[in-house]
Amino acid sequence: MGRNRATLADVARRAGLSKTAASMVLNGREGTRLSAEAHQRVFAAAEELGYRPNIAARSLRTRKTATIAFVSDIVATTRFAGGLIRGALDAARERDHVLLITETQGDAAFEQYAIEAILDRQVDGVIYAAMATRRLTVPPAILGGSVVLLNATSSTRLPWVLPDDQGAGATVAETLLAQGHRDRIALIGRNRQKERDPEISLAAEARLHGIRDALAAAGVRPLTEIFCPEWLPEHGYTATRTLLDLPAAPSAIICMNDRLAFGVYQALGEVGLTIPDDISVISFDDDPIAAWLRPGLTTAALPHEQMGRKAVELLLDGDDDGPSLVPMLLRRRQSVAAPAGTVPSPRPPGEGPPAADVSSGVAR
Amino acid sequence: MGRNRATLADVARRAGLSKTAASMVLNGREGTRLSAEAHQRVFAAAEELGYRPNIAARSLRTRKTATIAFVSDIVATTRFAGGLIRGALDAARERDHVLLITETQGDAAFEQYAIEAILDRQVDGVIYAAMATRRLTVPPAILGGSVVLLNATSSTRLPWVLPDDQGAGATVAETLLAQGHRDRIALIGRNRQKERDPEISLAAEARLHGIRDALAAAGVRPLTEIFCPEWLPEHGYTATRTLLDLPAAPSAIICMNDRLAFGVYQALGEVGLTIPDDISVISFDDDPIAAWLRPGLTTAALPHEQMGRKAVELLLDGDDDGPSLVPMLLRRRQSVAAPAGTVPSPRPPGEGPPAADVSSGVAR
DNA sequence: CCTCGTCGCTAAACTGATTTAGCAAAGCAT
DNA sequence: ATGCTTTGCTAAATCAGTTTAGCGACGAGG
């Protein structure tokens, strides 16, 4: 692999010039006074030899490696990681960079290893990513270089990229309101721990706020809010059973994530309630299951790919250092309808949804 | 980041020895005649200075980078990728290596970019991975070095790592047989394309063979085999509706993967059939949804993590070049029971499953 | 004709490691 | 005392680039 590759010296020799000249031409150095003809000859020689610079040699001198480290607590192994990595990968490729991936798994020793591996390889920058949107502590050792936090914030003053969970909360609430739901909107997935401890989650509080504020703006309060120890299907299931035992039946359920919603579907199915005719369900994340459920689950999508992309852009381009809240678009499927017994607001065919602006999930 | 790191020269100076001596000591070179005291001094100096070698400089000389490229068609962005990457990451870390990740997305230009990036960085080896278990074509440019195929085979003579789909097929069939299912076992997910074209899938045919052979060994033939254009929940759903319209009702359904099984659950739920009391369901993959379904889906798990690990081991250790079929263990949950109207074979508590050897999913 | 500046280019230093070739001193045999 | 080997260590080359310093030729101005 890579045996007998042409070196810069080979190119220079073939072009009849010095290594210096060849280097300058190939690097497009300004202000050099090399003739147009010299340029031609170098380019031709490089082309003919299929010359590719040796990155090790180059970075020995320049301390640049065209490599970005992607360090995550555990993200690389999660189903959510895909988008994050893919976006970063794409953006990196566009900038002729490559991604070095490591995982700390929340283990101090592993983190130490990752840091050293990164430092040893003199990466040009570090993307420090978290699986769950949260606040984390960045190891001081890497603070010397450029670092971008992905799906995370930190007490350190560092650029970060987060999904706009609060905006998504508003979008979700407004979507239900637009359909005519008002006083019978239930909320599943309240969780004190997640809401209070930013080291665990930033999403819980933000989503809750977005929902509450949007409802309040319409003069509405949630009918019930059910707490869940975790955001897994089983908890959505039991929460729904609890909910259905309550005297007042909800017309719509907002779930704090899609896995909860899956549990809601299961519970509703068991008691013979139909989505969305009897109850609407709406949620967050756009987990793959959202598309697989019947009926398809309407949900505010985590923009993982754009987030990964953005992180690389912040790291490498640096220019765009505005707010890095990435909007979460609402993926409209079939789980939301007007409340039962309501005449849906008239909507002539082909005129689009009644609250089109809401569906765009604008960042705030 | 990594400013003013101590160099080998610094260590040598502090130890009062030459760079040569320091280098040899730190690399644990045999046959050097450096005194025990010299060793001590070098180690002490390196320790005191927090010396870490500059990898660029080292690999310029040695052409080794302690870096492995993980090239995939699209695997890095899939939910299935997690385990593959995590296993590789772990095994790489144990061997003091790091992973460089690229994705070709099946695009020739991207693949070209990935190859060049890899060659430029002089990685020590390449893991070429596929999302779906299949046969693929390895770009000749990387054949000069060491390459291991992960979740894929190739016409090129290269070591590969595959899940033991055929063994899993047998395990699955035998599990149903052990429960007393015989002549009413239906199969959902036949697919001519997948079964015939190894470039699309190697799993379909292997699983089918495993199932058929195990059933045949018990003198049983599948009751019905339903074809599906894809292996998605909706296809499992419609396949089940079709199945239920047939005169003979199945006692158990084997699905070619978990997403199909999800569709089966949906269809069965709609018509009011209970799993496993009315019908048993069993499947392949151990997709996250398998655990979320109610009842939990019994399924032969794709051993992604072990596969990723194995790939690195083959690449770096090389010694173990035996068959790299990684067994797929059966994840026993609650979706399989004895057929309705059957007295379950007596099984005293605490004695383990009736066919314990089957449950271990031995590779074959 | 001399000096100075610009043009077009190059030699050599430098990056930080590994590795080859070999040197000085000590030990040993003759 | 002399020659040979072994011991313990080092100078210098090398990897493949980038970068600094500067050289020779030429033209213009005085």
Image: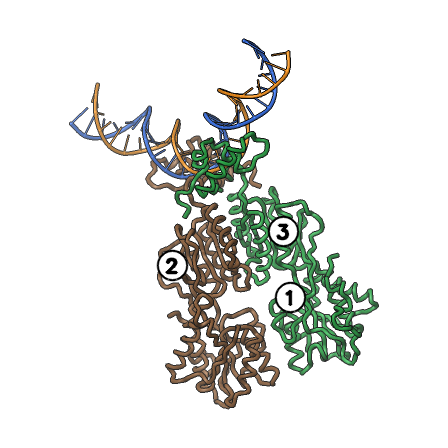
Chain colours: A brown, B green, C orange, D blue
Query: What crowding class fits label 3: few (fewer than 14 Cα within 10 Å), some (14-19), or many (20 or more)?
Result: many
Residue B112 in percent (x, y) is at 54, 49
Question: Which circle, 3 or 2, is nearer the viewer?
Answer: 2
Residue A118 in percent (x, y) is at 47, 49
Q: Are marks 3 and 2 on the same chain?
A: no
Residue B101 in percent (x, y) is at 53, 52
Quick one: A147 or B227, which is closer to the camera? A147
Task: Please name the amino acid that badge 1 sits on.
Answer: Asp
Task: Please name the amino acid that badge 3 sits on.
Answer: Ala
Res B286 label: 1
Q: Is the residue B128 above or below the residue A306 in the image?
A: above
Q: Are marks 2 and 1 on the same chain?
A: no
Q: Are marks 3 and 1 on the same chain?
A: yes
Question: Which circle, 2 or 1, is nearer the viewer?
Answer: 2
Q: Is the residue C29 above or below the residue A124 in the image?
A: above
Q: Is the residue A111 above or below the residue A7 in the image?
A: below
Q: Secondary structure at mark 1?
A: loop
Q: For mark 2, what is the residue?
A: A156
Quadrant for the C terminus of chain A in the image: bottom left
Q: Is residue B350 left or right of residue B313?
A: right
Gap between marks 2 and 1, in whole Å? 40 Å
Gap between marks 3 and 1, in whole Å? 21 Å
Query: What crowding class fits label 2: few (fewer than 14 Cα within 10 Å), some (14-19), or many (20 or more)?
Result: few
| Upstream in sequence: badge 3 or badge 1 | 1
Q: Chain of mark 3?
A: B
- Who's the residue at 52% across and 60% down the image? A74
Q: For mark 3, what is the residue?
A: B311
- Who's the residue at 38% across and 82% down the image? A216
Quick one: B52 or B128, which is closer to the camera? B52
Q: Tell me, yes or no, if residue A53 can be seen here.
A: no
Gap between marks 3 and 2, in whole Å? 38 Å
Quadrant for the N terminus of chain A in the image: top right
